[in-house]
Image (cartoon, rainbow, N blue to C red):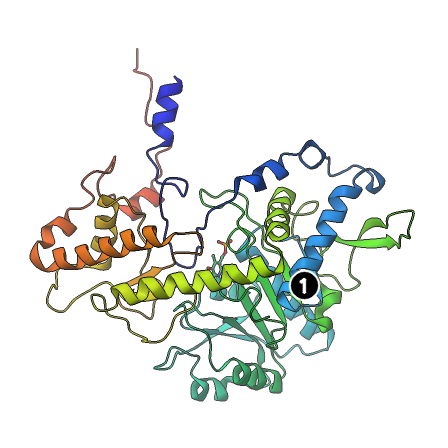
Amino acid sequence: MIRHFTHLSTLNYNIDSGMYPLGSCTMKYNPKVNELAARLPGFAFVHPLQPAETTQGSLLLMYQLQEMLKEISGFEGVSLQPAAGAHGELTGVLIIRAYHYAQGDTQRTRIIVPDSAHGTNPATSAMSGFDVVNVKTDANGNVDLAALRPLCDERLAGLMLTNPNTLGLFEQNILEVVEMVHEAGGLIYGDGANLNALLGIARPGDLGIDVMHFNLHKTFSTPHGGGGPGSGPVGVAGHLIDFLPGPIAQIVEEGNDEIPPLYGLSMPEQSIGRVKSFYGHFGMMVRAYTYIAMNGAEGLRSIAEHAVLNANYLLARVKDAYHLPYPRTCMHEFVVEGLWKDAPEVHALDISKRLMDYNFHPPTNYFPLIVHEALMIEPTETESKEALDAFADALLKIAEEAHTNPALLKEAPHHAPVGRLDEVKAARDLVLCCWVPEQA
Ligand SMILES: *Cc1c(COP(=O)(O)O)cnc(C)c1O
């Protein structure tokens, strides 16, 4: 039985067995010490209905994590409630709505979303009752300012910005974009799912962003994938603190030399309310806290430096073989086109499937939508130069095969437990039980 389940557990690719260059997902190494911390009985066995006097350690951890995230991001308030990135976005956009309503600004019905944005951005805006307006990307991969200007009027509630954007590029016009939107009375939502490139270098709050979510399960190394619990705290500038969802950990009685402070929970005055039962995914908070505390300020900055260095190293190694639609220095990830004019039958998907034959997880495919046959590659800071070289070698070999023996790509993967699946059918017609007892 053990052999059966151990075998099953190895059929799926995983970060502990190899590189996982899934762009925008930040599949970095998840330190095992995070797991030890989250399993400490004082954290693991605490009950959410226990009185605050008996849960001081957990409240202190939540309070300090809020403070750490504030310092990292330059925001003045943080709520740890949201359960994932998309949930943080929903929370943030509801905060924008509550802010405008509180000002009596009910005519603001539109949210601008760049055409390069993650699909959750327009989905969030629409779910919050806003009309989504697209703004296009210019030839350098930035928000097109000329296209943005006429959209900034009294109907504007806000704009959702990802920086670095999903092309892996730093938004060079960010200050102009922020100013234009603010002048029209709108707010800036920052999609902070991927802060790997910014840690210790630039703070979204300082750039003028009003509200942003973090993905603890990307930037701060808590595990994700398989639909497991994530955590998407939301940070806000001073004028939005009152609208944050609660409860929020706070000091209710200052301490002194002899007694430690007393921690408790509070609900902001004009709060949009709870967005999650109890306190959010507490176990994820313990993991992220452990990671941030272990790295310290200098460690976090070095994460950003290495994430950017690794991505640029990979890019430099492959850019003569793959077309780079926006030829700029990248941040923590980059996007190339997975097609060649002289190998017309080969598509990005074929390249990804062939990578599996070389024992690599495929990169993100067909996103962002503005790049034809996109391959979005994010190595993360935790890969060694040897791993990066092996991955670059595989990509170069595949580019050569695409021209000399395209069938190798079209028929890949050759060694995986299953071949090519009908992905639509697999999602729509899920078969969860493959064994049924024989009819008598
Ligand atoms: C991953 C991601 C999200 C959504 O986060 P989830 O935790 O998967 O809901 C949003 N925006 C960007 C840019 C992302 O990469």
Which residue corresponds to the image point at 25% horizontal and 64% vertical from the top-left?
A: 318
Asked if residue 194 shows in the view, the reply is: no
Judging depth in this view, the residue of 90 and 370 nearest the camera is 370
Image spot of residue 364 (x, y percent): 34, 56
398 up-or-down from 5: above or below: below
Judging depth in this view, the residue of 87 and 299 nearest the camera is 299
Judging depth in this view, the residue of 358 and 186 nearest the camera is 358
| Outermost residue, top side | 440
Q: What residue type is labelled 1?
A: Lys
Q: Name the residue under label 1.
A: 70
- Count all numbered tags in the image, as a single digit: 1
Question: In this rendering, would 419 be left or right of 193?
Answer: left
Q: What element carries label 1?
A: helix
Image spot of residue 246 (x, y percent): 73, 55
Question: In this rendering, would 182 be left or right of 365?
Answer: right
252 up-or-down from 341: above or below: above
